[in-house]
Amino acid sequence: MPTRFWSFMKNLRKSNITSLLLVFLFVFSAYANAGDVPIERDFLKLADGRWIWLEKVDWHKTKVMLGKGKKREYNAIWSKTYETDDENRSWEYAYFVHLKPRRLEYDLNGDGLLEVGISTYDMGNNMTRDILIFSVERNQLRFVRKHGPYNIAADESVF
């Protein structure tokens, strides 16, 4: 068995393309297994055509917008900018989390309004955060409560 392996490796070295592909596959699998947080989940389209957008506007600021029509800032019907100083929470990055499996929006309290969960991430080494639950009202997002602590590296549903 070891002789077969070494003869395979010798033939592999002869082919530069194969070696390059194996190196690429190794590097890609190393990053894929690291469990990066999905901070690119910053836009959510609701069933009624409205949308919620989390836009990073400064190093420690994120604007949360509720809008209708196309995803453009001038289509926003409500917005609020959150800063890192608010409640000792870092707003360097914010993204939506799954409240239920495969559901980013869900009516958690049965009041007929959808709720969304937003997590903040500051690239630090503490992977547990509180999830901020917002209720999606007609013309605004209303903060409901915090939920947590939640391990954001797990990327599983909160409830």
Image (cartoon, grey):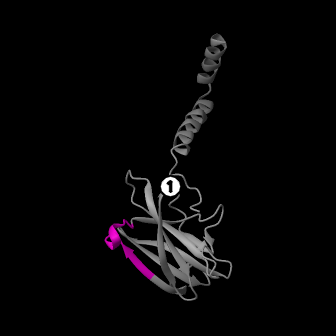
Q: In which quarter of the image is residue 136?
A: bottom right
Callout 1 amino acid: Val
Of residue 56 and residue 141, the one placed in the foreground of this image is: 141
Q: Quadrant of residue 5?
A: top right
Q: Residue furthest top?
A: 3
Eyeballing the image, is 53 above or below 92?
below
Determine the residue positioned at 60% across, 76% down.
109
Determine the residue positioned at 36% across, 66% down.
89
Count every numbered label the image shows and give the total.
1
Does 12 sit left or right of 153 as displayed? right
What span is in magenta?
80-91
| Residue at image mark 1 | 37
Looking at the picture, how far across and down is residue 105, in whole percent? 61, 71
Q: In which quarter of the image is residue 82?
A: bottom left
Of residue 8 and residue 144, the one placed in the foreground of this image is: 144
Residue 108 visible in the displayed image:
yes
Does 36 sit left or right of 2 as displayed? left
